[in-house]
Every structure is written in structure tokens, then in C-alpha cells.
Image (cartoon, helix red, strand yellow):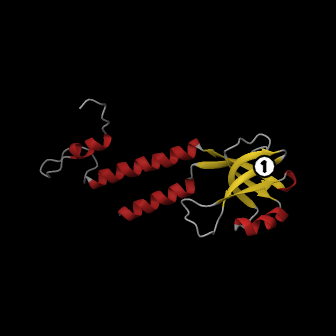
């Protein structure tokens, strides 16, 4: 039962996601933000050996503008380095090679859905774990649900 809840929550989080991408004018893109750039087929073929990426979509951080060109810092895939701390490369994209540029932004609606699902799953799990649909004492069972739930839902406000 517990594995089913975790699987359901994982699928919900993976399909909902908290970020979304929106098209942005390259001149208006903010430095130090995550972006997704689609480049021409020629530029993708040129970058493929260095980035270990054969698709024309490049995801990275917009580091600087060099005239009309954009410089992205892109994590290198498939380099055998830890995924926690990958190597990065700086990629220069000329305006002629850029097809689209999208900026990553936090989706408040999607984040709310994910957080609501987590709260509902935790609440349901606690209720099922305590063996009751209500957080009250059940005479004769020896289970004090209020005592079990109190540390979960209380916030210490100082003092001692």
C-alpha cells in the first residue's frame, strides 16, 4: 500500500512539474536565468561532439550577451562525471543560428497542485496509519491519535 502511494505521488510530480518555458526575445532575456534554445541543424551538428547532444535543443544558463550573440553555460552530458556536479561548457550562439529562445519560470499553479497533492498524501497516510478516519481517541484501542498527530502539526514558538 505504501509503495502505491509513493508511485502515485512520483507520477503526479513528474507529470505536473513546477517549471514551464515561455518564449522570450533574446534582447529581453535576463542574465543568469535558465533558458532553452533551439538552434539550426548546422549549429546542432557543430556542437554535437562537444556537448554529447545530437538534438537542436540546448538547455543551460544565459551567462552573457556578446553583441547580438548569446553565451550559454551548458552542462555536459555523458562525460562520466557525477550528475550532482557535472562539467559545464560555454556555448556561443549567433542570431543566425538561433531558432527560438525560451525562459524557464516557476509555474505557481503547477507548484500549488504538487504541494496540495503532497499535503493530501501525507494527511491520508497519517490517517490510515493511525487506523481511524478521525484524529480522536478510540476508546478501548489504546491509540491516542491526538498525541501522535500533535508533533506533526505543532510549531514551537520559542521559550522552553
Number of marks in picture: 1
The residue positioned 85% from the left and 51% from the top of the image is: 95
Q: Is residue 57 left or right of residue 156?
A: right
The residue positioned 31% from the left and 31% from the top of the image is: 157
Q: Quadrant of the N terminus?
A: bottom left
x, y (%) of residue 83?
56, 63
Q: Nearer the viewer, residue 100 or 144?
A: 100
Q: Residue furthest right?
A: 96
x, y (%) of residue 154?
30, 38
Q: Nearer the viewer, residue 2 or 40?
A: 40
- Answer yes or no: is residue 3 visible: yes
Q: Secondary structure at mark 1?
A: strand
- Answer yes or no: is residue 23 visible: no
Q: Nearer the viewer, residue 102 or 27?
A: 27
Q: Quadrant of the C terminus?
A: top left
The residue positioned 28% from the left and 55% from the top of the image is: 129
Q: In which quarter of the view is residue 151 placed?
A: top left
The residue positioned 84% from the left and 64% from the top of the image is: 42
Q: Which residue is mark 1?
A: 70
Q: Nearer the viewer, residue 17 or 39?
A: 39
Q: Residue furthest left?
A: 140
x, y (%) of residue 120?
41, 48
x, y (%) of residue 85?
56, 59
Q: Is residue 34 left or right of residue 129?
A: right
Badge 1 crowding class, 10 Å Cα cut-off, few under 14, some 14 to 19, many 20 or more, is many
Amino acid at each position: 500500500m505504501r509503495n502505491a502511494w509513493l508511485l502515485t505521488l512520483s507520477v503526479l510530480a513528474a507529470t505536473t512539474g513546477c517549471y514551464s518555458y515561455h518564449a522570450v526575445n533574446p534582447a529581453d532575456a535576463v542574465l543568469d536565468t535558465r533558458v532553452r534554445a533551439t538552434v539550426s541543424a548546422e549549429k546542432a551538428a557543430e556542437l554535437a561532439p562537444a556537448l554529447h547532444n545530437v538534438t537542436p535543443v540546448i538547455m543551460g544558463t544565459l551567462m552573457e550577451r556578446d553583441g547580438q550573440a548569446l553565451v550559454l553555460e551548458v552542462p555536459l552530458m555523458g562525460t562520466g562525471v557525477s550528475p550532482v556536479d557535472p562539467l559545464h561548457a560555454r556555448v556561443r550562439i549567433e542570431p543566425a543560428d538561433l531558432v527560438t529562445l525560451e525562459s524557464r519560470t516557476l509555474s505557481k499553479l503547477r507548484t500549488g497542485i504538487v504541494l496540495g497533492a503532497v499535503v493530501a498524501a501525507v494527511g491520508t497516510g497519517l490517517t490510515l496509519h493511525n487506523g481511524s478516519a478521525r484524529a480522536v481517541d478510540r476508546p478501548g484501542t489504546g491509540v491516542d491519535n491526538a498525541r501522535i498527530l500533535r508533533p506533526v502539526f505543532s510549531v514551537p514558538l520559542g521559550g522552553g
